[in-house]
Image (tube, grey):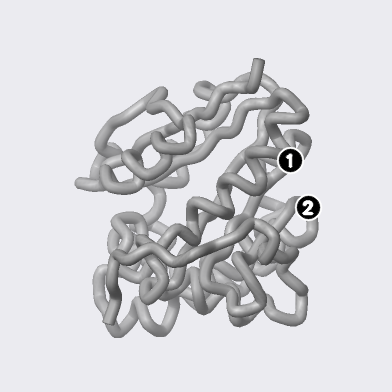
């Protein structure tokens, strides 16, 4: 049973995700995002979603491990965060294809990709528009549903933002739920753009945490 009771957590337990545990981390993300608005946009049928959701996360996690920092809350992998450094925040289509995107496209099918086109068309330009300066990118924050609302996402943000503050750089992210907006606001993120994605009913928030003065 999932409860909202907080547990005593520490950033000292946070680990860099080993490559050998990539599949486990992807499984955490699949559970965390199973009913997420962008997931249901692309995979409205639950049976198809169970089968195909993992393929979208494979290139994302591979890119994060290769070019960024992927943290887990502990060896138990209650939560995972993918952070991309300033020089790697804008992900090329070729990079994603090379790191598993070809397989994702093949396994997911053309219909799934077409459903996601409103998202793909919007994300890149919105990112460039709302974070034109040098910055970090919180690309993914996933907490296993049985551990949600217990503080695991918070310690992942705290750990990395302490390091980013030392660099005096901002942090950018996107989210698709109002609940998440409130969560990120607790850690200094501000909404810089909000709309409903064209051709969909999916809400989209761009958020920025300003650089430490």
Q: Is residue 21 above or below residue 33?
A: below
Q: Is residue 63 visible?
A: no
x 39%, y 54%: residue = 116
Q: Is residue 140 above or below residue 43?
A: above
Query: Which of the numbered marks, if any, corresponds to residue 195?
Result: none
Q: Which residue is mark 2?
A: 67
Q: How far from the left and from the top, in percent, is residue 42? A: 34, 62
x 69%, y 80%: residue = 21
Query: Which of the numbered marks, if any, corresponds to residue 85?
Result: 1
Q: Report which quarter residue 22 is drawn in.
A: bottom right
Q: How far from the left and from the top, in percent, is residue 115? A: 34, 57
In the image, 134 versus 56, the foreground residue is 134
Q: Is residue 156 above or below residue 174?
A: below
Q: Are marks 1 and 2 in contact (CB under 8 Å)?
A: yes
Q: Secondary structure at mark 1?
A: loop
In the image, 56 versus 2, the foreground residue is 2
x 34%, y 40%: residue = 181
């Amino acid at each position: 049973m999932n409860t909202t009771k907080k547990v005593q957590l520490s950033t000292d337990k946070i680990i860099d995700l080993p490559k050998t545990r990539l599949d486990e981390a992807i499984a955490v993300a699949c559970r965390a995002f199973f009913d997420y608005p962008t997931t249901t946009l692309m995979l409205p049928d639950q049976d198809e979603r169970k089968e195909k959701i993992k393929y979208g996360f494979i290139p994302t996690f591979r890119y994060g491990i290769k070019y960024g920092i992927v943290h887990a809350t502990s060896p138990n992998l209650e939560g995972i965060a993918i952070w991309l450094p300033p020089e790697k925040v804008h992900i090329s289509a070729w990079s994603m294809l090379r790191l598993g995107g070809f397989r994702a496209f093949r396994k997911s099918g053309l219909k799934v990709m077409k459903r996601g086109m409103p998202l793909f068309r919007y994300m890149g330009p919105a990112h460039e528009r709302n974070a034109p300066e040098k910055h970090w990118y919180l690309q993914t924050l996933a907490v296993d549903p049985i551990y949600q609302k217990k503080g695991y996402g918070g310690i992942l943000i705290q750990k990395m933002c302490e390091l980013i503050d030392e660099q005096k750089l901002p942090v950018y992210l996107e989210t698709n739920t109002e609940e998440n907006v409130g969560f990120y606001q607790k850690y200094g993120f501000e909404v810089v753009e909000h709309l409903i994605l064209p051709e969909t009913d999916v809400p989209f928030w761009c958020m920025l945490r300003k650089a430490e003065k």
